[in-house]
Image (cartoon, coloured by chain):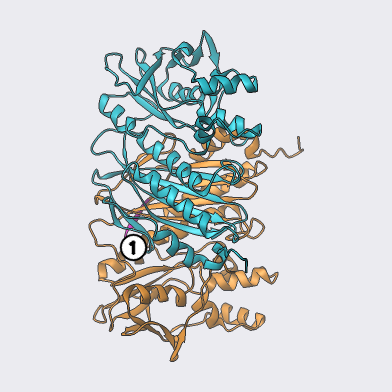
Chain colours: A cyan, B orange
Amino acid sequence: MNGRCVITVGDLGEFGVVARIAERLPQGGTVLLGPGDDAAMVRSPDGRVVVTTDLLIEGRHFRRDWSSGYDIGRKAAAQNLSDIVAMGANPTGIVVGLGMPADATTGWLDDLADGFRDECDLVGASVVGGDTTRCDLVVIGVTALGDLGGRAPVTRSGARPGDVVAVAGRLGHAAAGLALLTEGGSGPAELVDAHRRPEPPYACGPQAAALGATSMLDVSDGLLQDLGHVATASRVGVVLLPESFTVPVPMEKAARLLGVDPLEWILSGGDDHALAATFPETVRLPPEWTVVGHVVSGEGVQVRGRSMTRGGWDHFRQ
Amino acid sequence: MNGRCVITVGDLGEFGVVARIAERLPQGGTVLLGPGDDAAMVRSPDGRVVVTTDLLIEGRHFRRDWSSGYDIGRKAAAQNLSDIVAMGANPTGIVVGLGMPADATTGWLDDLADGFRDECDLVGASVVGGDTTRCDLVVIGVTALGDLGGRAPVTRSGARPGDVVAVAGRLGHAAAGLALLTEGGSGPAELVDAHRRPEPPYACGPQAAALGATSMLDVSDGLLQDLGHVATASRVGVVLLPESFTVPVPMEKAARLLGVDPLEWILSGGDDHALAATFPETVRLPPEWTVVGHVVSGEGVQVRGRSMTRGGWDHFRQ
């Protein structure tokens, strides 16, 4: 017993953990059956359900000394919800598989659950179920569901020569933040917090679908690599115009401090979960979208006449 | 370079791993968009989608020296598909988050993918997407989706006094197999294989729903504990009749060898993924179902007049 009594998940036991998490998670209008049974049930009025999953491993995707439980919950939810909106769909629900050490505190667990709740709340989704187990390191498996409301899904394969390439959301912020943390820095907050908690431009996904986007994806491995996926899937080339990116002042300063070209972060950094999409050139884009290039016949991604073949994050090689 | 060239997932890289897995996974009729985009898309003709998730951790839920990659894939799929049928739904698709060491071989990976494929094939579902990442130990997060075909979901909360309690599928086999492996045994195959690869009675889930089951669940924590969940959710008591269980000869022998009461395995062993359900006593049950007790007013689970409060597996305490 400590003077300041700390309750761990080991004290609660598996069913105590589940009950504690469940009571922090309100169930929204998309939910027909929430946590507590063998499975949950979510509305899918479209007759089709969009589904995506991600696995986050402590030490690889987050560090508990760099990110709070709340940040980790927000980030784990965000990267999956972002994949749903990148299809043009509206997120409806997520389920979470959570492995954690028995000495994780209930305070940390509450924060994590609150992070999931608040991120889902941004898009009208709910955490509808999950599974918890003991594990020496924190492991989080998230699956998100979404509904297209009758729209066609926006895949990676529909880009056509003549389309413009546009992005919505931040680029390079999370990469700059991670670089700063790795070097022992603790700011500027705008960058460091961007690593801890992405801010995907959720509304821009269904918006792009409604505007007639020909292809779209969530930028999670870096813009160059992700647009490379669009080029491959659509059998086209992409020309990126680096002068179309503005480097924010804090990023410019951080880059100078670390001796890095900030364009490297912008073009190759993942984890901001911006959206990249292609549109017919006749589409009038709202201000959330910035045109950064165009689609050509050919293959791959070119910047200043050079073919870019690297620039993303490969989880088995790095 | 070895004389016998072994290729690892580290050699393939993340996208190589994904491509290699995807080509082993046929996409069935429920799939509208398979692996390769930000998200997949599955039919949900009912307008509601049933969803469940489980996280499996190496050393806790399986051991690579006891189970092949194929066994692990079968088991990871089975325990999720079983949760879907336990709601009375038909499984449609699963997504898999896979963490593994860079030195995992492509042969092991192929076996794992084949295990997922073959288990899904039993119920007409497909592996529609996933995520892979490096992790020092193998971590598998599985989420399964299902469709109710217009039926009401069968939850844990509908049992009524007077109902019969019935089970379909095996009980205690996986627990006996695990006990044998733990003691250094390698047989009998019927029990050891049951630990490696459950055989859930998939068809019995939708069948029970159609027969009017008032409650149902998948037995994953042991029959006593899982029926305890039904009792709590339904605000009833359950009386179990131990004489209704038959102990198979190999289990009888194994129990004698290890000095264990085989009824302990049958009542408290998880991981066989039998189904337990309650039915109005007027329902004529098909031979797949064995009546093992009845529902009474009151609370908890009683066996031979004694209230049973333990008997399951708590992942944070054991």
Up-down: is A164 above or below A25? above
Q: What is the residue that sits farthest to the front in this orientation?
A: A3
Report x, y in % for residue A116: 43, 48
Q: Image quarter for residue B103?
A: top right
Question: Is B58 within the magenta?
Answer: no
Horizontal relation, residue B79 to residue A162: left or right: right
Q: In this rendered view, identify the residue nearer to me: A267 or A199.
A: A199
Residue at numbered disc 1: B87
Up-down: is A49 above or below A167? below
Q: Residue at x 54, y 18 (%)?
A: A263
Q: Amino acid at mark 1?
A: Met
Up-down: is B107 above or below A12? above
Span highlighted in magenta in the image: B88-92
Report x, y in % for residue B205: 34, 65
Q: Residue at x 54, y 55 (%)?
A: A99
Q: In this rendered view, identify the residue nearer to me: B285 or B219.
A: B219
Q: In this rendered view, identify the residue nearer to me: B111 or A44.
A: A44
Q: In this rendered view, identify the residue nearer to me: B76 or A269.
A: A269
**Quadrant containing the C terminus of chain B in the rendered view:** bottom right
Up-down: is A50 above or below A14? above
Report x, y in % for residue A10: 57, 65
**Quadrant containing the N terminus of chain B in the rendered view:** top right
Question: Is B89 within the magenta?
Answer: yes
Few, some or many residues within 10 Å of mark 1 (<14, 14–19, 20+): many
Q: Chain of mark 1?
A: B
Q: Residue at x 23, y 81 (%)?
A: B282
Prevailing secondary structure class for the magenta stretch in the rendered image: strand
Horizontal relation, residue A247 to residue A256: left or right: left
Res A215 visible = yes
Secondary element at image label 1: loop
